[in-house]
Amino acid sequence: MTIAPQNLSDPVVAAFVAAVNAHDQEAFFALLTPDATMSDDGTDRNLTEWTDREMFSSRGHMDVIKETDGGRSLVANYRNDTWGEMRTAWRFEITPEGRVSRFETGQG
C-alpha cells in the first residue's frame, strides 16, 4: 500500500513528491533553496544534472511506502525509464521558511 503525496505528513515533502510525479520541474525547483544540495547513495551529486537525468528526462516516479521523522524520511518504490523500479530511502532537510535545503536518496 502506498501513501498518496497529499497524505504525507510534511507539506514540503508532499509537494516535492507531487512535483516529481507530475514531472513539473518548475514546481520542483521552486521548493528548493538556491544553494540546495543532494546526495545519491552517499555521494554528493550535481543537483541540476542528477535531477534532469534521474527524475525529469527519465520520467521518475515515487510511490511512498513509509514515512518517519515527521514525514522527512521516506521509503519509496522509485522508478524511471533508465533503471526501472527500486526500493529507495529519502531524507529531507527543510528550512524554517519551508524549502528543501538538502535531500539524500539511495537504494534502501
Image (cartoon, helix red, strand yellow):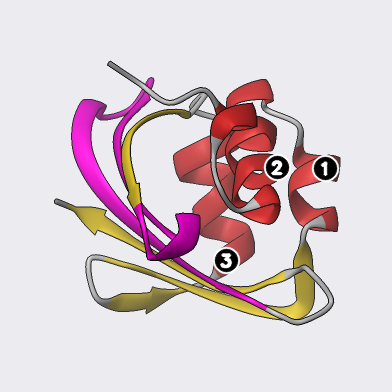
Q: Position of residue 74 (x, y in %)?
A: 35, 50
Which element carries disc 2, helix, strand or loop?
A: helix
Amino acid tagged 2? Ala
**Residue 24 is covered by the magenta coloring:** no
Q: Are marks 1 and 3 in contact (CB under 8 Å)?
A: no
Residue corresponding to mark 3 = 47
Q: Are marks 2 and 3 in contact (CB under 8 Å)?
A: no
Q: Up-down: is 80 above or below 25?
A: above
The total number of labels drawn is 3
Q: Are marks 1 and 2 in contact (CB under 8 Å)?
A: yes
Q: Is residue 61 left or right of residue 31?
A: left
Q: Position of residue 80 (x, y in %)?
A: 38, 25
Q: Depth check: 15 or 3 in front?
A: 3
The dot on residue 15 is 2
Q: Depth check: 7 or 107 in front?
A: 7
Q: Is residue 41 left or right of residue 105?
A: left
Q: Position of residue 48 (x, y in %)?
A: 64, 61
Residue corresponding to mark 1 = 27
Which element carries disc 1, helix, strand or loop?
A: helix
Q: Is residue 40 left or right of residue 13?
A: left
Amino acid tagged 3? Leu
The magenta stretch is 68-94
